[in-house]
Amino acid sequence: MGKQANQAVSTPGALQRLVNREDILQICYWYQGEGLGDIYNTKILQPFLNYDEALIEIALNELICDGYLETVLAPTQGYRFTEIGKKEAGRQFADSFADFQKAGHGECAAGCCDDGDHSQCGDDCLLH
């Protein structure tokens, strides 16, 4: 009984597995965007996550089943984005950081103002 109970406790539920997959997609997208590489594995991802390596492997395998990642055997064993995987990862990454991309108080959200000069602003600028 103890072995089965421990197994059930350490196996993530459906919601947690979804969160794990989304986190991993976003980290892979960031990792690639920073020029750190485009092949991912558990050892690369683990320092960025507060997950056990076994949970990372579960998520990576589920991302393969979902069609977002594919296995790479050479030159380094790991995983890389499929075309739809990269698009989905980019969308999730953008959604997660959308609030950080908004203009601050007194800043032009349209990006048209230069040092408070609103003479060239378009209709999208709330400051003119």
Image: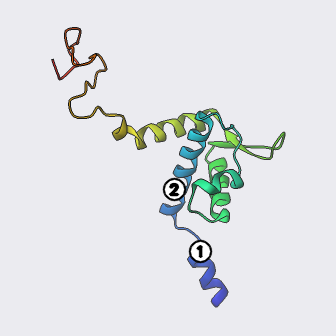
Q: Callout 1: 10 Å neighbours few (<14), some, many (20+)?
A: few
Is residue 116 placed above or below 90 in the rendered structure? above
Disc 1 and disc 2: Cα gap in Å?
A: 16 Å
Quadrant the N terminus occupies: bottom right
At which x and y percent is residue 23? 53, 51
Viewer-side residue, 64 vs 26: 26
In terms of secondary structure, where does tag 2 sit?
Answer: helix
Viewer-side residue, 33 vs 55: 33
Q: Amino acid at mark 1?
A: Ser
Q: Amino acid at mark 2?
A: Leu
The residue under label 1 is 10
At which x and y percent is residue 30? 56, 40
At which x and y percent is residue 60? 65, 53
The residue under label 2 is 18
Is residue 57 placed above or below 112 in the rendered structure? below
Q: Residue at x 60, y 43 (%)?
A: 28
Q: Residue furthest top?
A: 120
Q: Could you say which quadrant of the image residue 117 lies in?
A: top left
Q: Residue furthest bottom?
A: 1
Viewer-side residue, 99 vs 89: 99
Q: Residue at x 57, y 46 (%)?
A: 27
At which x and y percent is residue 15? 48, 61
Q: Residue furthest left?
A: 128
